[in-house]
Amino acid sequence: MPLLFTVIICTLLAGLGMTLGAVIARFENIAKDWLEQEFRHGVMAFGGGALLSAVALVLVPEGIAHLTPTWACLWFIVGGASFMLLDIFLNKINTPASQLAAMLSDFIPESIALGAAFATGSSSAFLLAGLIALQNIPEGFSAYRELNASGAYKPRKIIILFTIMALLGPIAGISGYFWLADLPNVLAAIMLFAAGGILYSIFQDLAPQVKLEKHWAPPMGAVLGFVLGLLGFMLTA
């Protein structure tokens, strides 16, 4: 029971990273325009670095440990293709919630994998929880700005919505904890599916928004995001 409680708390805290990102975006108020631009682009770059570290240090290494090269590559490609199709669909219906959908598409399979990782006693479970939280902050930041710019939702409602969505983490985590602990191949497929989707999102959504003409600081956010993941990996290895 204590381990299940750990799963619930870790997945909930990781999900609340979305709320924290939204709150930062809500109260962001930097007087100098150039600094505000640097900050926003730096936040997105940090998210890209954190996402990339989750792919490179946890999801792919854990996933390929239980699958043949053919199946590992297949699930990785399926993940990327699924996120691409979702992106195309959201673009066609012209919704202001594309960043929100992408954020949940990352968060739910990662939370399932996190619950299963705790059940199997994986040493990377806490690292994965930390990386999910780190990536959710800038994703929540971007999703809030997109929804707020549409004018369809009030800031308070967006933040409440993100807080409610954080509850999906424990639900997904508990599912993985009870149903996937004895199915390492399925868990590996979910991890690689998520990794492929995340890599697509990095280069489709985050990386193109990071660049600023005659500004060089924002990409360092990606370096810092990745190095935090690297530090966590080395401390838990």
Image: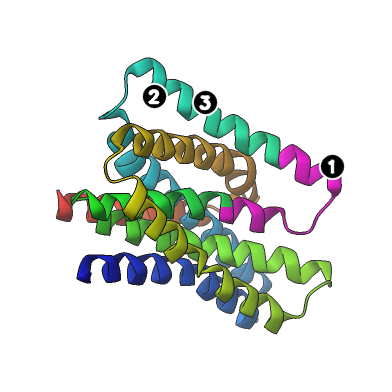
Residue type at mark 3 is: Ile
Residue 92 is at least partly visible in this image: yes
Identify the residue at image location x=56%, y=67%.
Answer: 39
Query: Where residue 81 appears, x then y in whole percent?
Result: 61, 30
Q: Which residues are magenta?
A: 87-104
As measured in the structure, the alpha-carbon distance from the residue carrying label 1 to the one carrying label 2 is 31 Å
Percent coordinates x, y for residue 206 in the rendering = 59, 48
Mark 1 touches mark 3? (CB < 8 Å): no
**Mark 1, secondary structure of its residue:** helix
Q: Are marks 2 and 3 in contact (CB under 8 Å)?
A: no
Residue name at image x 52 percent, y 50 percent:
106
The kind of secondary structure element at disc 2 is helix
Which of pointers 1 and 2 lies earlier in the amino acid sequence?
2
Identify the residue at image location x=58%, y=55%.
Answer: 103
Which numbered disc flags the more N-terminal residue, 1 or 3? 3
Q: Amino acid at mark 2?
A: Ala
Q: Is residue 131 left or right of residue 36?
A: left
Establish if 18 lies above or below 100: below
Q: Which residue is mark 1?
A: 92
Which residue is found at the position 47% from the left and 35% from the top?
Answer: 193
Chain-order first, disc 2 or disc 3: 2
Q: Is residue 126 left or right of residue 25?
A: left
**Disc 3 on helix, strand or loop?**
helix
Q: Which residue is mark 2?
A: 72
Looking at the picture, tell me which residue is in the foreground, 208 or 23: 23
Residue sitting nearer the eye, 78 or 227: 78
How far apart in space, not on screen, are marks 1 and 3 (Cα)? 23 Å
Q: Residue under circle 3?
A: 77
Find residue 19 and report its image quarter: bottom right
Crowdedness of circle 2 by 10 Å Cα count: few (<14), some, many (20+)?
A: many
Give the mark count: 3
